[in-house]
Amino acid sequence: MAFIPVVDFEVYKLGTSDVTDKNLQELCEEIRKAFTEVGFVYLKNTGIEQKEVDRVMDISKKFFLLPEEKKRPYSRGSYANNGNHGWVSSETESLNPQRPGDLKEAFNTASLQPDINWPSDGFRDTKVDFFMRCKELSLRVLKVMALSLGLDSEVFLKAHNYIGSDDNGTTLRSLYYAPVKAECAKKDQIRCGEHSDYGSITLVFQSQEAGLQVLNKNHEFISVPSIPGTVLINIADLMQRWTSDVFVSAIHRVLLPPGNDSSTRQSLAFFVQPDNDAIVKCCDGSDKYPPVNSLDYLLSRFNLSYGKK
Ligand SMILES: O=C(O)CCC(=O)C(=O)O
Ligand SMILES: [Fe+2]
């Protein structure tokens, strides 16, 4: 069997309201198996269409191809209402702090406020629309996850009331991996260093170019191809804590392209984060990990990955 299972979400796709208990239960079993054994799942038939993904990739790429001075006014750190919103230049972030800065650029849509400085109205509308679609799907997945553990269906949803407002750190991140010549990269530098994500779950949409790898239980990195029309979803660290390690937050990375490959790569990552004031406490009552405030935790992780220039 392939390493990461493909699960059909048809019965609970966006727009459906009449899922039967039996269908929901089958879905729960498959999701539980994927998230306990691998930490990643491909979902097909979610209701999010490939053309919606392509639209966001296209407008993002146009932005990334602008000269540096045109992108700088939108830099992360220049938005008073949200410290995580905006453009991140190449080599600024090290998701594995042991490595040089990642060879990628990003644009974080972390605030949906219409009156902040956006590159264009079309850019804003495309990002905001896609953010809302990802939000809807995430809430459905969080409900299925709770049910799959035999918990109250609202247990995770109750801590995700404010996605899309400045009281919640959920972020839609467009990533652009420019062509690289391996001989120009610094020692140990890759496109995205080994890391696990910070929040509850992450939705990932990849372009066709390879590079993403996930660490399996035998400590081997396995390549994770793009499957058009699917959404790749992974457990992140706060969710692993929340479930006392029942759901696993797997380490992953993006390698440099091989040899003379001058391809670019793009991805979209929707990082779902609990509300800023949420306290994440082991849901089995075990206190395996001390309770932690969602925003404090997120900020401590940003400090590590943006620690050096
Ligand atoms: O580009 C990708 O496919 C994944 C990027 C990633 O893991 C991240 O930004 O957290
Ligand atoms: Fe990641």
Image (cartoon, grey):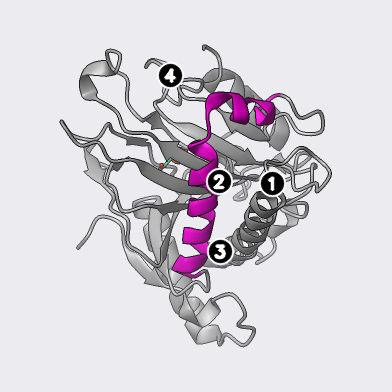
- Which quadrant does ligand 2 occupy? top left
Judging by the rendered image, the residue that carries numbered circle 3 is 141
Q: Earlier in the sequence, mark 2 or mark 1?
A: 1
Q: Position of residue 60 (x, y in %)?
A: 53, 46
Measure the alpha-carbon separation of dots 3 and 4.
32 Å
Q: Mark 3, residues whose alpha carbon is within 10 Å: few (<14), some, or many (≥20)?
A: many
Give the SS element for disc 4: loop
In percent of the image, x 49 and y 53: which residue is there?
Answer: 58
Residue 245 in the image: x percent, y percent? 47, 43
Going from N to C along the chain, the mark reached first, 4 or 2, is: 4
- Which residue has dot 1 on it? 120
**Residue appearing at x 79%, y 42% in the figure:** 166
User: What is the three-letter code of the residue carrying label 3?
Assistant: Val
- The quadrant in which residue 115 appears is top right
On the image, the x and y values in percent for residue 262 come to: 25, 36
Is residue 53 covered in magenta? yes
